[in-house]
Image (tube, grey):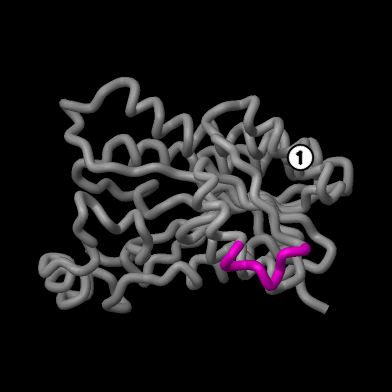
């Protein structure tokens, strides 16, 4: 028997990058998977990749920065499977921006996706989980939640807020049998690594500083499946006594200076 047989898992940003890898891992372990995302094109491509699980994998076009979209996501999931057992708040957005030149609209867009999106998804998913005796929420944060990166003040601040949302909801949802934890990836080789057409993980600066000088202790960027495995652990009964934790998945980046 697989760890997630008969369980329903919602993954926001579930059709690309870490989200897609996580969707595939949950499906492989028996879960009914609902991938939520803005791009119908990405959703269609993800369904093709996961075609061998087609009876148990779904895509629902969702903009988590819109509360009504989130309500509809939960309602449609309940119609499809009748339950919500696991929520992975993975949806995010990132771009480089000088703090002094940042626009209020773009600043809000980052917070609406990362923080408000996780708030709304957790709120409405928790109501569904309450009806079946509990569940698990895993928030995909970042090392940026506790460290600062240049030209990323919006992202740093949003991920820091997501960490606190993780802790706060872990306290408040405990009486309902809902565990809330997070993972904090470091440099992971996904589409978000490509900035201005350049993959930052392939630059000479990255290779010299983060790899050559072992700023990342394991001397390499991570892969999406390495984050997915941590997410599945926190969502599983193997983590039944873990609550409010944020697990670094960063190759040791956060332990160096």
Q: Is residue 220 magenta?
A: no
Q: Quadrant of the C terminus?
A: bottom left
Give the overall secondary structure of the magenta segment: helix
**Percent position of residue 229, x then y:** 57, 71
Looking at the image, which residue sits at the far top?
104
**Percent position of residue 212, x then y:** 16, 77
User: Relative to residue 46, is residue 244 depicted above or below?
Assistant: above
Residue 176 in view in this figure? no
User: Relative to residue 170, is residue 215 depicted above or below?
Assistant: below
Residue 73 in view in this figure? yes
Q: Quadrant of the N terminus?
A: bottom right
**Percent position of residue 117, x then y:** 55, 35
Determine the residue positioned at 77% across, 36% down: 75
**Percent position of residue 157, x then y:** 36, 37
Q: Tell me where the magenta segment starts and ends, as one range.
A: 48-55
Taking 238 as reference, is 200 left or right? left
Q: Which residue is mark 1?
A: 76
Taking 76 as reference, is 233 left or right? left
Question: Which quarter of the picture shows residue 48?
Answer: bottom right
Determine the residue positioned at 54% across, 55% down: 15
């Amino acid at each position: 028997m697989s760890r997630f047989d008969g369980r329903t898992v919602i993954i926001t940003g579930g059709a690309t990058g870490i989200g897609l890898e996580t969707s595939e891992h949950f499906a492989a372990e028996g879960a009914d998977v609902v991938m939520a995302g803005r791009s119908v094109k990405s959703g269609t491509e993800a369904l093709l990749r996961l075609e061998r699980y087609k009876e148990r994998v779904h895509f629902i076009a969702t903009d988590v920065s819109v509360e009504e979209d989130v309500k509809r996501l939960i309602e449609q999931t309940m119609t499809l499977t009748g339950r919500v057992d696991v929520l992975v708040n993975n949806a995010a957005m990132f771009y480089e921006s000088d703090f002094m030149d940042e626009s209020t609209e773009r600043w809000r867009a980052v917070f609406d996706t990362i923080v408000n999106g996780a708030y709304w998804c957790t709120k409405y998913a928790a109501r569904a989980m309450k009806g079946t005796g509990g569940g698990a929420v895993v928030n995909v944060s970042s090392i940026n939640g506790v460290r600062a990166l240049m030209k990323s003040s919006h992202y740093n601040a949003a991920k820091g807020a997501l960490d606190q949302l993780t802790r706060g909801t872990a306290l408040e949802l405990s009486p309902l049998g809902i565990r809330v934890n997070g993972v904090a990836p470091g440099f992971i080789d996904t589409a978000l690594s490509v900035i201005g057409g350049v993959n930052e993980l392939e630059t000479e600066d990255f290779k010299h500083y983060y790899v050559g000088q072992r700023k990342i202790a394991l001397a390499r960027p991570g892969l999406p499946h390495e984050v997915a495995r941590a997410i599945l652990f926190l969502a599983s009964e193997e983590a039944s006594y873990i609550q409010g934790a944020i697990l670094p998945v960063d190759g040791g980046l956060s332990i160096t200076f």
